[in-house]
């Protein structure tokens, strides 16, 4: 197995699904608890959506958080172990689907918001998903992405796109075999949106109250006018 690949990401998260679910549900990640959880919820709700699709939903915390605020909420993830935990906890509809399967039409409904919250770790699979998101959005819908801030997550490595080794530093010894991830500069993220048929409406940088550094970066985008992959209002009503 290629140590820097989407296959390796899948393998790692499959092994760590129980551990990750416990960490998220017990609020053990300080940056999420203090900053990023609220940041992504606020970004979604200010769009006043009637429907939200969480792509890469993990064990389903965001779907549950939105369940009493949005009429229709659903989540999809490639890891069956995470989806099983999401389904057990409830709050919405959940589906096992890879980004490639989503791009091929595995999900046939349209949503006012498609969100990816710290779930864009790979290279080709992420690029494939970006191309497919317009076909998942209802007219005037938004694509919202929260991810690691490139300037902070770069560390001592060169500030250039490329695969990075994963780490479970700061987590319990129960975690094993960390997943690699594909680093993108801020400019590369912007280019990915533009090349996938989006226009960026907003880029925000939630600040950690203790470090006073960006805890993440949030992109909010809409499809460009006359995007052939964007469903029309008539089509969405059928």
Image: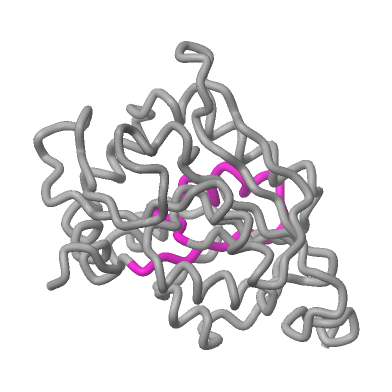
Residue 209: percent from left, percent from top: 53, 14
Residue 162: percent from left, percent from top: 35, 57
Q: Is residue 71 magenta?
A: yes
Q: Quadrant of residue 207?
A: top right
- Left or right of 47? Residue 134 is left
- Left or right of 143? Residue 65 is left
User: What residue range appears in magenta?
Assistant: 56-78
In the rendered image, the quadrant that contains the C terminus is bottom right
Residue at 33 percent across and 33 percent down: it is 155
Residue at 45 percent across and 60 percent down: it is 56
Q: Quadrant of residue 112?
A: bottom right
Q: Name the colouring of the figure.
A: one colour
In the rendered image, the quadrant that contains the N terminus is bottom left
210 vs 188, nearest the viewer: 188
Q: Is residue 171 magenta?
A: no
Residue at 84 percent across and 65 percent down: it is 140
Q: How many marks?
A: 0
Q: Quadrant of residue 46?
A: top right
Q: Residue furthest top?
A: 210
Q: Is residue 139 above or below residue 177?
A: below
Q: Is residue 133 above or below residue 182?
A: below
22 vs 134, nearest the viewer: 134
Residue 105: percent from left, percent from top: 55, 86
Q: Is residue 91 above or below residue 32?
A: below
Residue 222: percent from left, percent from top: 77, 61
49 vs 168, nearest the viewer: 168
């Amino acid at each position: 197995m290629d140590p820097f690949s989407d296959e390796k990401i899948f393998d790692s998260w499959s092994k760590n699904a129980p551990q990750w679910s416990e960490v998220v549900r017990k609020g053990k990640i300080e940056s999420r608890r203090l900053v990023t959880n609220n940041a992504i919820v606020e970004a979604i709700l200010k769009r006043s959506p009637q429907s939200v699709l969480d792509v890469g939903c993990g064990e389903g915390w965001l779907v549950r958080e939105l369940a009493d605020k949005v009429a229709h909420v659903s989540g999809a993830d490639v890891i069956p172990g995470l989806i099983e935990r999401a389904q057990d906890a409830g709050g919405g509809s959940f589906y096992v689907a890879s980004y490639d399967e989503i791009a091929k039409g595995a999900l046939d409904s349209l949503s006012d918001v498609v969100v990816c919250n710290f779930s864009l770790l790979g290279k080709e699979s992420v690029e494939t998903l970006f191309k497919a998101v317009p076909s998942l959005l209802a007219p005037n819908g938004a694509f919202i992405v929260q991810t690691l801030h490139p300037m902070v997550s770069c560390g001592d490595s060169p500030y250039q796109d490329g695969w990075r080794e994963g780490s479970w530093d700061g987590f319990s010894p129960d975690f094993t075999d960390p997943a690699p991830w594909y680093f993108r500069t801020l400019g590369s993220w912007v280019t990915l949106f533009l090349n996938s048929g989006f226009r960026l409406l907003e880029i925000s940088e939630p600040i950690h109250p203790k470090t006073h550094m960006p805890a993440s970066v949030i992109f909010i985008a809409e499809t460009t006018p006359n995007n052939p992959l964007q469903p029309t209002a008539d089509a969405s009503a059928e």
